[in-house]
Amino acid sequence: MEKIKRQWLCRILTGALAGVAAHVLLGYVLGSFSLFGPARFTGFVFPYCGFPREIEWLGVLLSFALFALFGAEAGVATLPFADSGRELVVRSLVHYMVTAATVCLWAGLNVCSAPADYLTFLVPLTLVYLIVWLGRWVGWYAEVAAIREKLGLAPGPSPLHWRESLPYVGFAAFLCLALPLALRLLEDPTPLLSVLYGWLLLPVGGFMSGLSLGRRHGFCPIYPAACVVFILIFIPLARLFSNISDVELIPIALVCVLAGNLAGAARRRVKRRGETAR
């Protein structure tokens, strides 16, 4: 119990410090942003939560505190919430609602002026949650399959590991088709969500899912190919309601997923060699 408490405290403190660092970075970005001409740092500009000028420093402290709280909540999320399925779902939903409330409170004090503005913050948060949940589900599925294989209850590896890749194909459909379509439908004239997807959600989700698959089953070429296929399906569908070019998503998906899968396969091989040497 003491060990578990220390783990939680360590993750909370680490997450809080990361949140404070992110707020400092935000202040630097706001101090460098310019509508005209190149960006040039003119000093830190921190959000002040709409406080009057006389007590503006209190608003800045509140903004720092909310970022630290969000970081602590993210740090807690790196630990398992429960062992049983129902309890895990309930605690995860509670954690999501608390995290969403923190994000909405900060956004409402600093950015949002209308209810629809909150979607800009809630949609990426919810999608990240879904990506993590699907990724963990795929991992649990793969672990059960590995246990069955060791007990002699499952057949050997399939050609090109196509059977082992099937659970991950569902995740690829979400990451490379459903997710970008949902973001595109929510997009406003400034394509911030599309930029967030192309340069953060897709690379991170693709690399981590490929890494997970490679660590469990080795090199699986079908999974990177499936991601590219779903991106190719997304591109003409997105053209029905937007004129944004999405061709660059093809190499991003291919390179990131393939790199993650190769890295996972290499780690699996090194681990097996170490076990054999023992």
Image (cartoon, grey):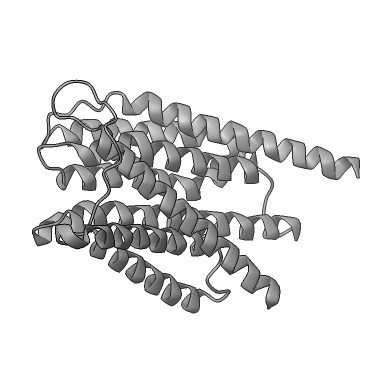
Outermost front residue? 54
Q: Residue at x 83, y 41 (%)?
A: 274
Give the total of numbered labels: 0
Outermost right residue? 278
- The answer to which quarter of the image holds residue 91 is bottom left
Where is residue 14? Give x, y as percent.
Answer: 54, 57
- The answer to which quarter of the image holds residue 140 is bottom right
User: Camera-side residue: 55 or 24?
Assistant: 55
In the shown orientation, is residue 98 left or right of residue 277? left
User: Camera-side residue: 9 or 32?
Assistant: 32
Q: Residue at x 24, y 65 (%)?
A: 105
Where is residue 162? Give x, y as percent.
Answer: 54, 40
Q: Quadrant of the N terminus?
A: bottom right
Q: Residue at x 51, y 74 (%)?
A: 85
In the shown orientation, is residue 195 left or right of residue 151? left
Q: Residue at x 33, y 38 (%)?
A: 28
Can residue 227 be spotted in the picture? yes
Q: Is residue 225 above or below residue 92?
A: above
Q: Quadrant of the C terminus?
A: top right
Can residue 220 be spotted in the picture? no
Where is residue 204? Give x, y as percent.
Answer: 44, 40
Outermost top residue? 37
Q: Is residue 32 above or below residue 60?
A: above
Where is residue 6? Give x, y as percent.
Answer: 64, 69
Q: Is residue 229 above or below residue 151?
A: above
User: Camera-side residue: 220 or 89?
Assistant: 89
- The answer to which quarter of the image holds residue 62 is bottom left
